[in-house]
Amino acid sequence: MRKGCKQIKAVVFDVDGVIVPIKSSWGYIHEKLGTVEASKRNYRLFLEGKIGYWEWMYLDTLAWIEAFPGLTRWDLEEIVSDVDPLPEAYEVVKCLKKRGYKVGLLSAGVEVVVAKVARLLGIEYWMAPLLEFDYRGRLVPGGYPLVEVSKKHVALARLVKRMGVSLAETVFVGDSIWDLSAMKRACIGVVVGGVEESVWGEADIHIQSLYELVEILGLQC
């Protein structure tokens, strides 16, 4: 717990690799559509600073459309239909809500996955990059980068404001180096799963299962 922290009132979770078993919803769709090579190329351009986050979204979604002309929101929902929350996620979220905690989702993953997870878990507050669709529901290249993978702390501040709590009252749970900025801004930064040592060392707490979060908060459910 960092200096200036207050009583914990909210828990915000990353989604990919934390709430759902897949490590990347973007990568999952690329695999399903056969656009993995384009994905790798776009990722490399982003890491090298040659494109920004919106351009990355544009190139990734363009690759999907070129591989599957006329790709719709409903097609994407069908592609990710097997991506469901982990059993422990249902139990932990239910416990947190029962004990009066506000629960949120913050992800740089694909919107259709995050929206589905929020619906299944009964979570009102969530934020993710929004895809763009035309009036027929067909995917349009680009989107709205409400959550940028390298600036999650900015999105976290916006999300907790909507939730009616402060960063000093929030726990953030992530699983990768991209979650570190949000972990450091929250009162408590928790990393879950087997991650690289650099991430483990930067987080306040390292857990192997979401069940451990209930224990850390001292809850009985």
Image: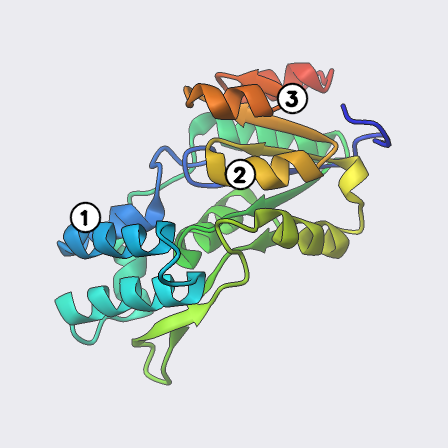
Which residue bears the numbered disc 2? 179
Tell me how far mark 2 sits from mark 3, CA to CA: 13 Å
* Amino acid type at mark 3: Asp
Tell me how far mark 1 sits from mark 2, CA to CA: 23 Å
* Amino acid type at mark 2: Asp
Which of marks 2 and 1 precedes in the sequence?
1
Q: Given this view, does label 1 or label 2 mark the residue nearer the observer?
A: 2
- In the rendered structure, the answer to whether residue 125 lies left or right of residue 41 reads right
Which residue bears the numbered disc 3? 204
Which of marks 1 and 3 precedes in the sequence?
1
In percent of width and height, residue 105 lies at 57, 46
Which residue bears the numbered disc 1? 31
Dot 2, crowdedness within 10 Å: few (<14), some or many (≥20)? Answer: many
Which of marks 3 and 2 precedes in the sequence?
2
In percent of width and height, residue 12 lies at 63, 40
- In the rendered structure, the answer to whether residue 50 lies left or right of residue 154 reads left
